[in-house]
């Protein structure tokens, strides 16, 4: 076998799934030198995952690609629950309808779209020639622990791969293992998957059904005497995914499409005959939950997605949590490689945050999977009503909105001595995603979600709730706060860079917008930016009645009193890092010093 000279790259991503591509989007936005190695011979054509959490939709929106996603996807609005008919237990009857998502959870919907299409949307953000090496199989990963510890700029990781019979060698500063459940990266590092699998076997198929079942175009949970089925309509108007519990004692190797379809018919019963015009895809699997015993090596190689956590697919978590792993680590590597943050401080937070998230997912999935296990429900006297109630209560978690990161150098959850986050902004929680609310943009009266004014380009956001500028004390306080924030942002911004490129700013007023003049807004919130050197007017908003879209009541939604105001630090990935009173603006300098590298004195 021939070999090639070693190629150096800052970040080598092994695998072009959801985690790897999401991390790559960040690296591209930070201008980092990266490459993706993918063993498949081309982009994913048909993905097995399809459920897109509201949190994932929010991420796509922050990247500017949610519009296509929402236009193409099936929108899950309602869940129907079916159980044995008390009058005829051999048949099923609807017991309940419920909203798939509570409005308060997110302003975005829960949708269904094939993973291949999601990957294509992210790939489209990587430039006209994405740096993806298809048909390139990783064989070995080695870490020089000495170099990794001594020199943060060392190419301390060596990766050997094969493409077209030629052995290639890559030397990287950092490597992401995004190569799935059978991860070569994980095996090379000697890490193990710890957990178990049950004897419960399920079949899954994407079908074009012929049936009179009235809820075939709704998400359904069916518990019948013959077993359980989860119905998930797909994009378009006809394709449907059926997750089907198979009888006890079934072996995965013995499952056939004909047997799977016959069992699905028995679950639907004679009242709702089921035929299949076409089957687009099918598979069978045993339920298991496993977690890697380590998520990193020397903070130079990081595992993501199925390479470090596997579980059942019924809660729709796999693709989403994997993508969010990449979303978490990508911006951190970007900041480190642009020399904006200290690697020894920032990078360990990936492991702190996502290892806990994965462990919580395994626990949730183990309990959630039992709801679909007929034997478990029978032995533990779990009624159809219990199943429906649990399903509804789990809505925040399955939407991806229950993640709460533990306190760390970038998650300042400990209240200060003079105020607490609960009293300053009770609608927000440090360590959780920054929720959105409708506001009116000051410069053009446009009603919009506040997060639309916070695109994910790699910068941190200082969100200032200044109250009503018609009150002299509020106006004076804002001027004082601005002086502190301007000094802090300047200190951590490289010379020659736009003033909002590292620490950006958002101002939300409780004023009547039409009574405030532009020159009353501190210049800090209208910085001169971009290649044309123009004043940016899109960072100031008012919480007021819009012309055509009603009132967003943002201050109320965020739990901020207009007379007190609040200051919220939001990370590049839109998680809340710190909440402070306006009087505590100076404390932000110490916060950023904890992990950022000052760029000026």
Image (cartoon, helix red, strand yellow):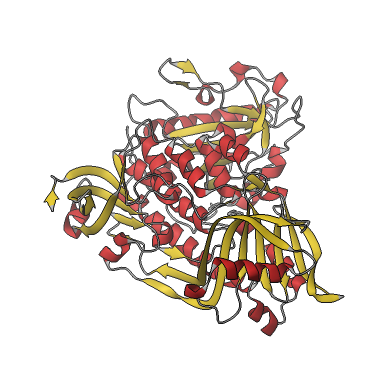
Q: Residue at x 57, y 43 (%)?
A: 58
Q: Is 156 located above or below residue 338 in the figure?
A: below
Q: Residue at x 71, y 52 (%)?
A: 217
Image-quadrant location for residue 496: top left
Q: Residue at x 66, y 43 (%)?
A: 107
Q: Nearer the viewer, residue 458 or 412?
A: 458
One can see residue 72 in this view: yes
How far from the left and from the top, in percent, is residue 422? 63, 52
Please indicate whether residue 513 sits to the left or right of residue 174 in the image: right
Q: Is 507 located above or below residue 93 in the figure?
A: above
Q: Nearer the viewer, residue 152 or 354?
A: 354
Please indicate whether residue 283 sits to the left or right of residue 98 in the image: left
How far from the left and from the top, in percent, is residue 487? 43, 31
For the image shown, how many numbered marks are present on the structure? Answer: 0
Q: Nearer the viewer, residue 472 or 449?
A: 449
One can see residue 481 in this view: no
Q: Residue at x 75, y 64 (%)?
A: 273
Q: Residue furthest bottom?
A: 379
How far from the left and from the top, in percent, is residue 553? 73, 38
Q: Quadrant of the C terminus?
A: top left
How far from the left and from the top, in percent, is residue 9? 24, 43
Q: Residue furthest right?
A: 87
Q: Nearer the viewer, residue 208 or 119?
A: 208
Please indicate whether residue 547 sits to the left or right of residue 436 in the image: right
Q: Is 530 located above or below residue 297 in the figure?
A: above
């Amino acid at each position: 076998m021939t070999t090639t000279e070693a190629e150096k790259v800052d970040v080598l991503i092994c695998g072009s799934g959801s985690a790897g591509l999401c991390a790559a989007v960040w690296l591209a936005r930070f201008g980092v030198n990266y490459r993706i190695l993918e063993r498949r011979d081309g982009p994913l054509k048909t993905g097995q995952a399809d459920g897109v959490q509201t949190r994932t939709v929010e991420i796509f929106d922050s990247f500017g690609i949610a519009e296509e996603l929402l236009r193409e996807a099936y929108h899950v609005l309602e869940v129907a629950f079916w159980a044995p008919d008390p009058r005829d237990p051999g048949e099923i009857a609807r017991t309940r309808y419920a909203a798939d998502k509570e409005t308060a959870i997110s302003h975005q919907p829960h949708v269904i779209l094939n993973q291949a299409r999601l990957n294509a949307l992210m790939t489209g953000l990587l430039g006209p020639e994405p740096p993806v090496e298809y048909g390139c199989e990783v064989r070995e990963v080695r870490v020089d622990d000495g170099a990794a510890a001594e020199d943060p700029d060392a190419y301390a990781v060596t990766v050997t791969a094969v493409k077209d019979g030629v052995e290639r060698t890559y030397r990287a500063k950092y490597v992401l293992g995004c190569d799935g459940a059978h991860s070569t990266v994980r095996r090379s590092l000697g890490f193990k998957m710890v957990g178990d699998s049950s004897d419960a076997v399920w079949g899954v198929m994407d079908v074009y059904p012929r049936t009179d079942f009235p809820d075939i175009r709704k998400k359904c949970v069916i518990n019948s005497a013959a077993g359980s089925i989860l119905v998930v309509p797909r994009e378009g108007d006809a394709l449907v995914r059926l997750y089907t519990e198979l009888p006890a004692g079934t072996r995965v190797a013995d499952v056939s499409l004909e047997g799977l379809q016959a069992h699905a018919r028995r679950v639907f019963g004679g009242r709702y005959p089921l035929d299949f015009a076409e089957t687009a895809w099918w598979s069978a699997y045993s339920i298991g939950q496993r977690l890697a015993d380590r998520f990193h090596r020397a903070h130079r190689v990081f595992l993501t997605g199925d390479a470090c956590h596997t579980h059942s697919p019924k809660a729709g978590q796999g693709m989403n949590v994997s993508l969010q792993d990449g979303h978490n680590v990508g911006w951190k590597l970007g900041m480190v490689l642009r020399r904006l943050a200290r690697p020894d401080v920032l990078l360990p937070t990936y492991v702190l945050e996502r290892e806990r998230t994965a462990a919580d997912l395994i626990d949730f999935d183990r309990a959630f999977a039992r709801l679909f296990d007929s034997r478990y429900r029978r032995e533990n006297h779990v009624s159809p009503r219990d199943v429906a109630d649990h399903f509804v209560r789990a809505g925040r978690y399955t939407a991806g909105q229950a993640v709460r990161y533990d306190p760390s150098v970038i998650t300042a959850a400990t209240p200060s001595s003079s105020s607490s986050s609960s009293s300053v902004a009770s609608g927000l929680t440090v360590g959780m995603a920054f929720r959105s609310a409708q506001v009116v943009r000051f410069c053009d009266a446009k009603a919009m979600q506040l997060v639309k004014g916070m695109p994910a380009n790699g910068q941190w956001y200082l969100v200032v709730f200044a109250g009503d500028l018609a009150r002299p004390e509020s106006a004076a306080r804002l001027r004082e706060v601005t002086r502190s924030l301007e000094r802090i942002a300047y200190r951590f911004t490289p010379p020659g860079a736009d003033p909002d490129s590292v620490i950006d700013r958002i101002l939300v007023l409780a004023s009547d917008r039409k009574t405030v003049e532009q020159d009353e807004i501190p210049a800090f919130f209208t910085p001169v930016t971009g290649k044309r050197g123009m004043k940016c007017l899109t960072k100031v908003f008012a919480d007021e009645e819009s012309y055509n879209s009603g009132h967003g009541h943002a201050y109320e939604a965020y739990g901020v009193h207009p007379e007190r105001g609040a200051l919220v630090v939001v990370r590049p990935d839109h998680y809340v890092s710190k909440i402070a009173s306006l009087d505590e603006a100076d404390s932000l300098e110490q916060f950023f010093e904890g992990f950022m590298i000052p760029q000026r004195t």
